[in-house]
Amino acid sequence: MLVALGATSFTPGRAPASPANGRSAVGVSMKWGELLGEGETTATRDLSIDRGRGWALTKDHGPLIITLATTGNINTRENNPTLPCSPREMADQMHECIKLGVSVLHIHARNELLKPTMRVDKFRETVRLIKERDPDVVIQISTGGRAPPVQFEGVDVGEWRMDPLNLMPEMASYTPGSVNLGPIVYQNDAKLVKDMAQRFTETGIKPQVECFDTNMISNANQLVKQGLLQRPLDFGLVMGAPGAQECSLRQLGHLISMMEPGDTWTSIGIGKFEMPLAYMAIAMGGHVRVGLEDNNKTPDGEIASNYDLVKHVVDVAKAMGREIATPEQARQILSMPAENADWILDKLDPSVPLESLVSNMSPYQALEPIPGSLEMRPTAAHPDSPDGKELSPYSDPAAAAA
């Protein structure tokens, strides 16, 4: 049986109240870019003024938005022991990468079995922990959870995937079509594609249109004509995934040629293609996504951490003459109103019942509240319960909140 957390005071526009004490976090300070190095950054000077300095690519293309994708659906602790799976693990690694210059966070969720899930309590607690320390960062929630709710009777797959949008993040991922990815089919049928596009337009949440092939750009353009999406569009170009489009300069040029003036794009290179595609994006006016969701290794073949991958992109961008965008600049580049940043804060208020944020309570039965957290804990009767299973540790939110 679900028990709502106690109501607390909450002021929109500020860091969310802590369920542990009902007060806004004290001493919250944005740590964005503190490790970028000494001297001026794009946050401290007007890029429109030519002072005879370097940063030629910044003058041509503007600052570079770096998106961090820490976890995803596919990667495992067996492949990479540093993979963050719990809300606290994700928020901690995100915080360190924000210090380097990350301005957008692409967020997935994992359950207690370390498997992908679309449980809203997981997303909600992850965002709460992020916003306590980094209130200015852009939240981009994934709707691509390849985690069909087959263990929960009567749950519609489309609603399960769209429920996290009820948190009202500034951004969310969106794939307007299906694709073969190695042995699996990443399925996005026509109804889901239309329903999700309509949700974005109705709410004002900014979609990042993830494109695994050229047809997905065509689909997005058609949805614009139908009034279901609005320009300018932001595209995430997924390249090098097994079974999907190749990662090559000719394919990238073709994808860019299909966009309209004002559209933006971000490189999402898979595996060994993550960094080569990132370099192309830095040089050609795109933006970059990196993280363990897409790639496990540094360019020299060592097992990577999220921090390693972000630092490499920052170093290369600086060497190539492209400065790093702040969260404020990222919003301007992506045509997102600044006030949208605070939408999600209302949903992080512990007094907001989980029932109001989900379409079907079946996946949340046999979960129990965790004191001081928006995350729920599965009892032995819940399919996500790790009882009796040998798993690598999932950080204990109750211990962390104590």
Image (tube, rainbow, N blue to C red):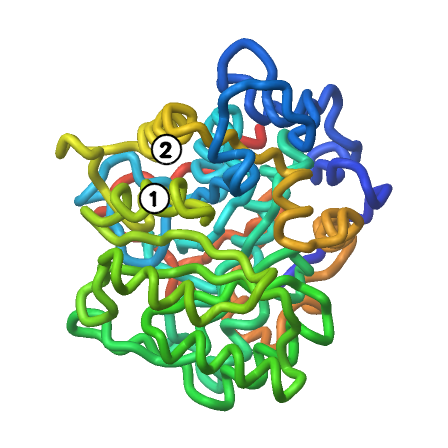
Q: Would residue 157 be visible to someone looking at this image?
A: yes
When asked about the image quadrant of residue 167, the answer is: bottom right
For image coordinates 71% across by 24% down, the residue present is 28
- 209 sits left or right of 77 in the view: right
Mark 1 sits on what residue? 278
Mark 2 sits on what residue? 313
- 109 sits left or right of 128 in the view: left
Above-or-below relation of 341 to 135: below
Instruction: Bin the neighbour count of mark 2 within 10 Å (Cα to Cα): few under 14, some 14-19, many 20 and up.
Output: many
Mark 1: amino acid: Ala
Mark 2: amino acid: Val
Label 1 residue SS: helix
For image coordinates 67% across by 84% down, the residue present is 227
Q: CA distance from mark 2 to mark 1?
A: 7 Å
Mark 2 or mark 1: whose residue is earlier in sequence? 1
Above-or-below relation of 161 to 267: below
Label 2 residue SS: helix
| Nearer the observer, 243 or 58 | 58
Q: Residue furthest front?
A: 52
